[in-house]
Amino acid sequence: MFAAVKKWWATFQIRRPELSKFLMFVLLSNGVTVLQLGLMPAFRWALDSYTSLTDLSFQAWPVGTNADGTTYYMFDYAAGSLPEGGGGFAYFLAVQTTLLIAQVINFFLQRNITFKSNTSPWIAAFWYTVAYVAITFIAAAAQGFYKAPIYDFFMITTGWGAGGSVVADVLTMIINSAISFWVFYPIFKVIFRQKPIRVEVVEGVTAP
C-alpha cells in the first residue's frame, strides 16, 4: 500500500510539479499548525501559572488611534488576564515562542521536502528570517482587530470561562497561521529554488 502511494506520488510530481509542491506545502503547513495549536495554550498556561508576566504590560509601536480615542499599538498586550486585559507579556511570549518554534521546523521541512532546494541554506535562512519578521509585524497589527472580541465572546458571552480561553487561543493561532500560510508560499518559491545540476562529460570515458 505504502509503496503504491509512493510510486503514484513520484509520478504525480513529474507530471504536476507545481501542484505537487503546493499540496506538499499545504500538508506540512497544516502539520506545523497542529503543533502550534498544542503549544500555544500550553505555553500560556505555564507562563500564567508560574510567572507574574501576565501583570506586565507589553505595548509597542503605536501606529494610530482606536475609535474610542485610545492608542492603537502594533503589539498590544496590556497587563491583566484576558478578556479584561490583553494577556500581558506572558501572552506575547506564548505567541512568539510558539511561532518561532513552528517556523524553524517549517523552514527545514519546506526546504528539504517540498522544494528540495539545493541553494545556500544560509542565504535562504536570512531571507526566511526577514520574511518571518515582516509577517510577525503584519500578524501582530491584524491581531489588534480580532483578539479582544474573540476572547470576549468565548469567555464571557458564551459563559465558558477558562474553557473559552482555550478555544480562543486555538482560533487566534489558526488566524495567525492562515496569514503566514498565504504569505509564505510565494516567498518560499523564491528562496527555496533548485539550481540545475551541472553534469560534465569527460571525452573518452564511458559510463558503466
Image: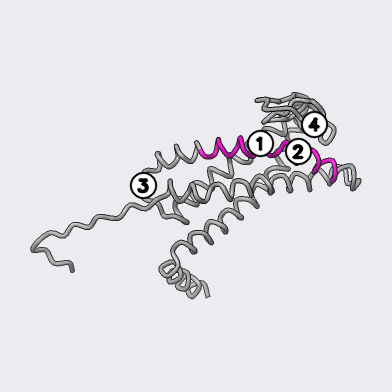
The mark lying in front, picked from 1 and 3, is 1
Task: Assess whether residue 142 is covered by the magenta stretch.
Answer: yes
Circle 1 — which element? helix
Q: Which mark is residue 140?
A: 1
Circle 3 — which element? loop
- Tell which of 168 and 138 is nearer to you: 138
Q: Count neighbours of disc 4 (C-alpha within 10 A) and say few if under 14, some if 14 to 19, many if 20 or more.
A: few
Residue that mark 4 sits on: 67
Q: Earlier in the sequence, mark 4 or mark 3?
A: 4
Q: Earlier in the sequence, mark 2 or mark 1?
A: 2
Circle 4 — which element? loop
Rounded to the nearest angstrom, the CA distance separating label 2 from label 1 is 21 Å
In the image, what residue type sits under mark 3?
Answer: Thr
Residue that mark 2 sits on: 45
Q: Earlier in the sequence, mark 2 or mark 4?
A: 2
Q: Count neighbours of disc 2 (C-alpha within 10 A) and say few if under 14, some if 14 to 19, many if 20 or more.
A: some
In the image, what residue type sits under mark 4?
Answer: Ala
